[in-house]
Amino acid sequence: MIDWDIKEIEKIEQHYKKTLNPSLNLTYFCRHFEEIYRLLTDEEELLPDILNDITYYTINGINAKYKVLISADTDKQQTEKLLARRMKQRAQRQEARNKGLTEYHKFIIKEVAEFIKKYPYWKELLRYK
């Protein structure tokens, strides 16, 4: 079981409830993280960038990804395969940030919405007002 820093995650979730529409259900993400991460590992897909950030919010600061039992070889291979896509994702995030807060928020929601479009069974990641 992952030792999420629930207090910090709830603070972030409350912030996004106020600023995003739809907002993010980060508590749901944490409850289902292992399933999501295993699926994405098998399918060689990236987490939406904002959800990737949440993986660092554990009590001891160790990324939650490293607490999911996946072979070292599989982890290394996936990291290498996804590196170019991850760098592109980071560049898109920075570009959105440079355009302003509204564009950054659009980027966050767009990535999560695209993820849900591909994996509709994780639709609870977004909360509509």
Image (cartoon, rainbow, N blue to C red):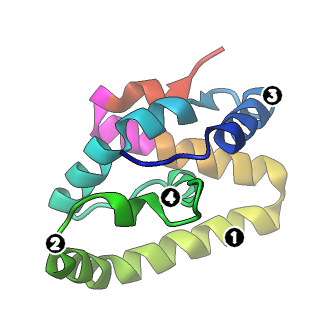
- What residue is at 73 percent from the left and 27 percent from the top? 17
- Eyeballing the image, is 46 above or below 119? below
- Residue closest to the eye, 85 or 60: 60
| Horizontal and vertical percent position of residue 84 | 39, 82
CA gap between label 2 and label 3 equals 39 Å
Q: How many marks?
A: 4
Q: Nearer the viewer, residue 80 or 93?
A: 80
Tag of residue 71: 2
Q: Which mark is residue 129?
A: none
Task: Give the mark nearest the N terminus, 4 or 3.
Answer: 3
* For discs 4 and 2, the disc positioned in front in the rendered view: 2
> Within the image, what quadrant is residue 66 found in?
bottom left
- Which quarter of the picture shows residue 1? top left
Task: Classify mark 2: helix, strand or loop.
Answer: loop
Point out the frontmost of discs 1 and 2.
Answer: 2
Q: CA distance from mark 1 to mark 2?
A: 34 Å
The amino acid sitting under disc 2 is Ser
Is the stretch drawn in magenta largely helix, strand or loop? Answer: helix
The residue indicated by pointer 4 is: 52
The residue closer to the viewer here, 5 or 105, is 5
Image location (x, y in percent) of residue 56: 56, 61
> Looking at the image, is mark 2 or mark 3 earlier in the sequence?
3
